[in-house]
């Protein structure tokens, strides 16, 4: 009887270590999914909770067990089985994204080139939106600086105008020509929106 309980205790300890090792493996996959793209057995195991519980990775100290047993051990080791399942999902998603990146990166095929063009167009659109936001913030900041300088007096206003001219001069260093057909004068827009009576 005593020998049986000792074996049970040892097996339980091994299973606890196995769950910790599994959690660590999942964290590594999330961090560097590219390393695991060729492991088909791992990819299939990540598809469901049950498949992952039944999969053994002896070289990593991860043993197969029933899903219910893994749930109980994960509650004990990680605080909840949900934490282990969240890691599984994150690892699966990381590998799926890594596979998609590899496919997109294959510019030797027509589909790969089209995917790369779409990706670059999306990046370009985001950069344009960021540039618009930054330009708007810059314009507002300039208006505020002029207002504060005007309130401070003539000497501060003169210094502010000089520094503003220096900043404007740096825009002449731009490499890409500036389109002027899409520039909106904020003062004109504001006076048009709120005409004085």
Image (tube, grey):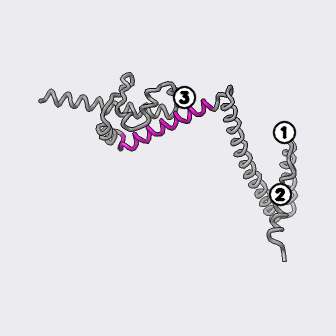
Foreground mark, 3 or 1, reads 3
Whether residue 85 is in magenta: the answer is yes
- Taking 28 as reference, is 152 left or right? right
- Taking 97 as reference, is 177 left or right? right
Rendering coords of residue 25 (x, y %): 43, 31
**Magenta residues: mostly which secondary structure?**
helix
Which mark sits nearer the N-terminus, 2 or 3? 3
Rendering coords of residue 63 (x, y %): 33, 28
Q: Residue at x 51, y 24 (%)?
A: 38
User: Label 2, label 3: how many angstroms apart (C-alpha)?
Assistant: 46 Å
The part of the image, by quadrant, that contains residue 149 is bottom right
The part of the image, by quadrant, that contains residue 67 is top left
Q: Residue at x 21, y 31 (%)?
A: 8
Q: Residue at x 47, y 25 (%)?
A: 39
Q: Nearer the viewer, residue 66 or 135?
A: 66
Crowding near the residue tagged with mark 2, few <14, some 14–19, many ≥20 C-alpha atoms within 10 Å: few
Q: Which residues are magenta?
A: 78-103
Question: Where is mark 3, residue-wise?
Answer: 34
Whether residue 119 is in magenta: the answer is no
Question: Where is mark 1, residue-wise?
Answer: 175
- Taking 181 as reference, is 103 left or right? left
- Residue 184's disc is 2
């Amino acid at each position: 009887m005593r020998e049986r309980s000792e074996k049970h205790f040892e097996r339980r300890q091994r299973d606890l270590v196995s769950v910790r090792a599994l959690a660590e493996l999942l964290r590594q996959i999330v961090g560097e999914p590219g390393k695991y793209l060729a492991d088909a057995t791992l990819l299939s195991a990540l598809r469901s909770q049950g498949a992952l519980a039944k999969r053994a990775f002896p070289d990593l100290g991860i043993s197969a067990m029933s899903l219910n047993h893994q749930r109980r051990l994960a509650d004990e080791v990680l605080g909840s089985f949900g934490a282990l399942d969240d890691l599984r999902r994150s690892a699966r998603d990381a590998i799926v994204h890594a596979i998609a990146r590899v496919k997109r990166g294959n510019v030797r095929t027509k589909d790969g080139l089209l995917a790369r063009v779409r990706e670059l167009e999306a990046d370009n659109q985001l950069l344009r939106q960021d540039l618009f936001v930054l330009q708007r913030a810059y314009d507002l900041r300039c208006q505020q600086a002029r207002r504060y300088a005007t309130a401070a007096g003539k000497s501060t206003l003169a210094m502010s105008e000089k520094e503003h001219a220096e900043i404007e001069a740096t825009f002449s260093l731009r490499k890409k020509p500036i389109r002027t057909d899409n520039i909106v004068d904020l003062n004109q827009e504001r006076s048009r929106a709120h005409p004085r009576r």
